[in-house]
Image (cartoon, rainbow, N blue to C red):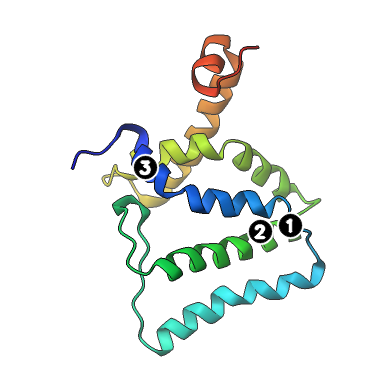
Amino acid sequence: MPCLPWGIDTAIGAIPYIFVGDLFKKYNYKRWHITFAILPIIIIFGFKLISFQYKLNMASMVYNHILLDLLIPIVFGFALYQMAMLCRNTPIQSILSVCGRNSLTIFYLHAAVLSCESINIYLRILLAISGGIMLQAMFEKYRLLRFLFLGKRS
């Protein structure tokens, strides 16, 4: 089956995760909720203890464990959210904020960049994030690109 351009097929599979992420916007953070950040560690050690092999690869669009495929990204996403809340009012917050505002552009660019296996993985990650940020800045700067890629008329 041929792949759709820009990873649109993968984007459709990401809708449940995007929905859950959108629900996090309404979440009321309490300082004691940081204890939930321990859940990913428990999951990792639990899987190691019972020798359970689990892999989630959204690019293949194959979901073998529907419950785990929803639960594990949510738990890890919540833990990342907790860590981001700890970074509030620090210089790290501004970096995370820039990445968050540009996340869709980074999302669409990362698949192409990460597929270049001849480049070191850490450099590919850096290129995907920085390239997405630069593309987004270019989209916002020029009126035609702003209209074409962001759907904004002004």
Question: Residue 147 appears at what percent x and percent y?
Answer: 54, 15
Of pointers 2 and 3, the one earlier in the residue sequence: 2
Residue that label 2 marks: 81
Is the N terminus in the top left, top right, bottom left or bottom right quadrant? top left
Question: Real-space Cα distance between discs 1 and 2?
Answer: 10 Å
Q: Residue at x 55, y 73 (%)?
A: 40
Residue that label 3 marks: 111
- Does residue 46 sit above or below 11 in this rendering? below
9 lies left or right of 99? left
Q: Nearer the viewer, residue 139 or 92?
A: 139
Q: Residue at x 51, y 78 (%)?
A: 43
Q: SS of the residue at dot 3?
A: helix
Which mark, by number, is residue 27?
1
| Residue 59 visible | yes
Q: Amino acid at mark 3?
A: Ala
Q: Residue at x 36, y 33 (%)?
A: 6
Q: Amino acid at mark 1?
A: Tyr
Q: Nearer the viewer, residue 141 or 120?
A: 141
Query: In this rendering, which labeled residue sits more in front, label 1 or label 2?
Result: 1
- Does residue 10 sit above or below 49 in this rendering? above
Query: How packed is label 1: few (under 14 Cα within 10 Å), some, or many (20 or more)?
Result: few
Marks 1,2: beta carbons within 8 A: yes
